Amino acid sequence: MLRSKLPAALLPLLLLAAPLQAQDALDRGAGFFLTGRLNRAIKFFSGTVKQNPNDARAKEILGYCLVIKGKEALREGRYEEARTALSGAQDFFPKNRELKLLGLLAELDQTAPTPSIPVSTEALTTTAETNAIFECLFGDGPCSKGGRYAVHIVRKGETMAEIAIKYYKDMTKWEKIWGANPQIPNPHRLEKGMKLLIPLD
């Protein structure tokens, strides 16, 4: 499992990488992943992608989590679980031929079990996917450059200008918040309980 692969001293250092004034909305999912709770991370990032389908960063992290889950399941002989996870990962990485082959192998082993088809150990390692998730969460590559945001729940009577002051210390940045929330037709009519994405980049 992933938990055994991460040094215990590494977790606090990685969590400190989060911005101090506002937490990145993906920090909770990162915490699940970093503590080895892969299924909880998948559930978190699935919900994030469902809530914000344009979040490329969450999509990429979810895709890599599904690849890790699929490879671990295939390695342990849980073929249905492997096939489901790898199929889900293919939605995020449609050009990845390795995923397609691993998915077909899982399907073959499930429908026509054979006496131990040897699968390359290297094909089932998850180091590349784990590193890609770290890069998305804490690196400076293309995945980590965009998409850092906080989720703000609107309080009664709150305006976008007030929210801009809270996050940016500048009320003129309310348009940045409005631009990140195209579902809001009128930025001057916020309702209590609305969820707004607040870009942190």
Image: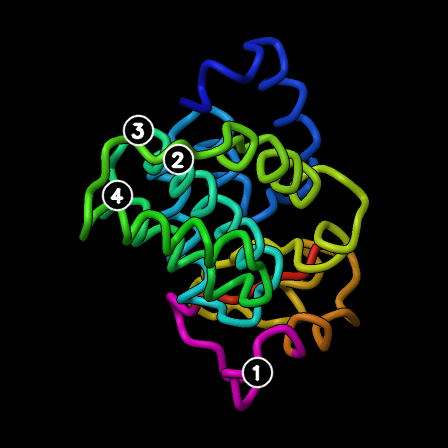
Q: How is the image coloured?
A: rainbow
Q: Nearer the viewer, residue 65 or 159?
A: 65
Tell me whether circle 1 and circle 3 mark residues in contact (CB < 8 Å).
no
Ranked by sequence position, the earlier of labels 4 and 1 is 4
Q: Which one is closest to the eye, mark 4 or mark 2?
A: 4
The amino acid type found where label 3 is placed reads: Glu
The number of discs equals 4
The amino acid type found where label 4 is placed reads: Tyr
Q: Which mark is residue 38?
A: 2
Q: Which mark is residue 79?
A: 4
Q: Which mark is residue 182?
A: 1
For the point 50% across and 32% down, the residue is 120
Label 1, residues with CA under 10 Å away: few <14, some 14-19, many ≥20: few
Tell me whether circle 3 and circle 2 mark residues in contact (CB < 8 Å).
no
Ranked by sequence position, the earlier of labels 2 and 1 is 2
Whole-number angstrom distance, CA of label 2 to CA of label 1: 31 Å
Residue 65, image x and y in percent? Answer: 47, 44
Q: Which mark is residue 76?
A: 3
Tell me whether circle 4 and circle 1 mark residues in contact (CB < 8 Å).
no
Q: Nearer the viewer, residue 32 or 127?
A: 127
Q: Circle 4 — which element?
A: helix
Stretch in magenta: 179-194
Quarter in which the N terminus is drawn: top left
Which residue of the protein is positioned furthest toward the front in this rendering? Answer: 115
The image quadrant that residue 48 belongs to is bottom left
For the point 52% across and 17% down, the residue is 5
The amino acid type found where label 1 is placed reads: Pro
Whole-number angstrom distance, CA of label 3 to CA of label 2: 16 Å
The amino acid type found where label 2 is placed reads: Leu
